[in-house]
Image (cartoon, helix red, strand yellow):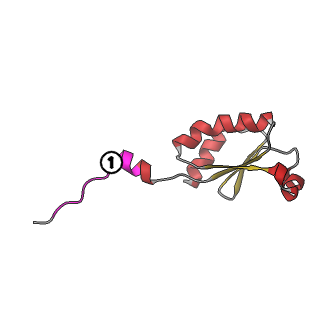
Amino acid sequence: MSELAPKRTADALAQTHSGPDVTVYSKAGCHLCDEAKSAIAPLLREFRSTLREIDIEGDATLMERFGCDIPVIYIGRKKAAKHRVNLEQFRRQLEDAS
């Protein structure tokens, strides 16, 4: 008689699955950056996404590239938002990247 493998519960599957990587280019003291990170936090939890924050101030190349055009948010390698985040659009982008 063969032994059946245990069923994986939805919780177990959720713990093993991680969502798309999200990167935000920002700098300290940027109120738009703080607002954007706060706004996307619930969606990041929902999609089990990892947020990587990159401070542009310590890198001359990033300062030249982004300057005051922050925050800039990427999902994977695709730009998802700049300055302000449309949460409905951001949700769709996370769904597409999942």
Q: Is residue 56 visible?
A: yes
Q: Which residue matches tag 1?
A: 9
Confirm whether the magenta stretch covers residue 91.
Answer: no
Question: Which is more toward the observer, 18 or 79?
Answer: 18
Tell me what residue is drawn at x 61 percent, y 53 percent.
Answer: 21
The part of the image, by quadrant, that contains residue 39 is top right
**Whole-percent x and y of residue 51?**
63, 48
Q: Main secondary structure of the magenta part?
A: loop
- Disc 1 is placed on an element classified as loop
Q: Is residue 86 visible?
A: no
Three-letter residue code for mark 1: Thr
Q: Which residues are magenta?
A: 3-13
Confirm whether the magenta stretch covers residue 12.
Answer: yes
Asked whether, in this view, residue 75 is left or right of residue 31, the answer is left
The part of the image, by quadrant, that contains residue 71 is top right
**Whole-percent x and y of residue 31?**
79, 33
Tell me what residue is drawn at x 86 percent, y 55 percent.
Answer: 65
Question: Which is more toward the observer, 26 or 13?
Answer: 26
Tell me what residue is drawn at x 24 percent, y 59 percent.
Answer: 5
